[in-house]
Image (cartoon, rainbow, N blue to C red):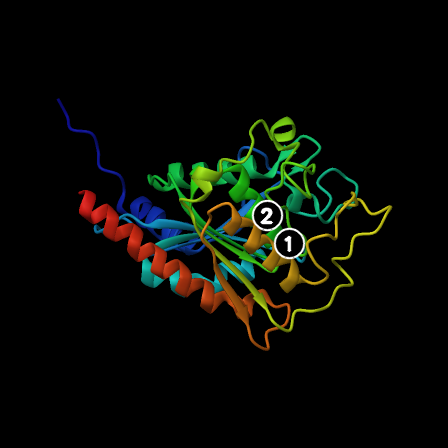
């Protein structure tokens, strides 16, 4: 029997070039298969597939300005030197056709569950690269900080670390008030109440600038889309509101590293170095534990 002909060398070369250009390093923007209204980009270490420890996943969530590629790029060196894939989702403004800038912050909008969309992206990336991400780290600043702490409440089993940066408003673990101010209606809206024991197992950082004091964008008023009673009860500005969230978490036995950064205004990119330090510390613990278990 005649042996099958080998692939032409040029075809193999083209596939290798395409992989190097589009699948490794900083990638182009990719539509999410589960719902192409949403997309993401990645940084994938070029060492992938060359042996050694499999990479971990870090998700960087944009804020209201949707600067998702900027956060991907800011964490590129971290991904390269710590063997991590960086996933930066894009949740566009107005996916329901109404111009709403804030839907993703509150986790549910029309038929969309934003935590489910992110989990679909994670699964898609893992499948494409032949990896497994049972848990990942999540960073979000400003609008992304909204998303990060509410994702932690909804999906704590999916995270090994969460860095919550300068959210304009916070949801407290409070069974006496409805979502989004509290968690009383969370089971009705999302199918489950907060699993506080699971949240205690996630490493949590909260970070905000001491000079982040403007309130024009975060003061809720009657008639606003996000208005509900007690919407402003956690504090006047971002440091006060994040400190309220810290105290609330700690009252429930959830340890928090709180970084109040001197002289820092509302600028998520300026927070990245401290977030990288936090993730690096937790990553070392995670890998050390995995090595001991092996």
Q: Residue furthest right?
A: 223
The image shows residue 214 at horizontal and vertical percentages of 73, 68
Q: Residue furthest left?
A: 1
In the picture, measured across the screen, residue 87 lies left or right of residue 225, that is left
Residue under the point 67% across and 55% down: 64
Q: Residue furthest front?
A: 251
**Residue 30 to residue 21: above or below:** above
Quick one: label 1, few (<14), some, or many (20+) residues within 10 Å?
many
Do tag 1 and tag 2 residues touch (Cβ < 8 Å)? yes
Q: Residue furthest bottom?
A: 263
In the picture, measured across the screen, residue 3 lies left or right of residue 287, that is left
Element type where label 2 sits in the image: helix
Residue nearest the observer in this picture, 66 or 265: 265
Element type where label 1 sits in the image: helix
Residue nearest the observer in this picture, 51 or 53: 53
In the picture, measured across the screen, residue 206 lies left or right of residue 185, that is left
Q: Which mark is residue 197?
A: none
Which quarter of the rendering shows the C terminus?
top left
**Is residue 89 visible in this depiction of the protein?**
no
Q: Which residue is mark 2?
A: 147
Q: Which residue is mark 1?
A: 143
State the separation of the CA atoms marked 1 and 2. 7 Å
The image shows residue 247 at horizontal and vertical percentages of 56, 54
Residue nearest the observer in this picture, 284 or 100: 284
The image shows residue 41 at horizontal and vertical percentages of 51, 51
């Amino acid at each position: 029997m005649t042996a099958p002909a080998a692939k032409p060398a040029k075809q193999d070369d083209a596939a290798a070039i395409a992989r190097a250009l589009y699948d490794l390093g900083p990638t182009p923007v990719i539509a999410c298969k589960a719902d192409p209204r949403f997309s993401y980009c990645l940084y994938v270490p070029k060492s992938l597939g060359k042996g050694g420890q499999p990479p971990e996943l870090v998700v960087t969530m944009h804020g209201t300005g949707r600067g998702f590629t900027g956060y991907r790029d800011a964490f590129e060196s971290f991904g390269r030197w710590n063997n991590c894939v960086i996933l930066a989702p894009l949740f566009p403004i107005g996916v329901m056709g109404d111009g709403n800038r804030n839907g993703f912050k509150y986790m549910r909008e029309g038929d969309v569950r934003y935590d489910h969309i992110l989990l679909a992206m994670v699964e898609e990336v893992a499948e494409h690269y032949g990896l497994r991400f049972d848990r990942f780290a999540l960073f979000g600043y400003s609008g992304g900080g909204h998303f990060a702490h509410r994702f932690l409440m909804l999906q704590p089993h999916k995270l090994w670390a969460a860095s919550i940066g300068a959210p304009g408003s916070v949801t407290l673990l409070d069974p006496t008030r409805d979502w989004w101010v509290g968690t009383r209606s969370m089971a009705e809206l999302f199918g489950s109440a907060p699993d506080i024991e699971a949240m205690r197992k996630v490493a949590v950082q909260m970070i905000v600038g001491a000079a982040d004091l403007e309130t024009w964008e975060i003061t809720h008023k009657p008639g606003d889309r996000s208005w509900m009673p007690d919407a402003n009860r956690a504090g006047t500005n971002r440091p006060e509101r994040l400190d309220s969230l810290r105290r609330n978490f700690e009252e429930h036995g959830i340890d928090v590293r709180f970084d109040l950064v001197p002289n820092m205004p509302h600028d998520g990119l300026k927070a990245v170095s401290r977030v990288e330090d936090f993730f690096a510390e937790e990553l070392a613990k995670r890998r050390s534990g995995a090595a001991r278990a092996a």
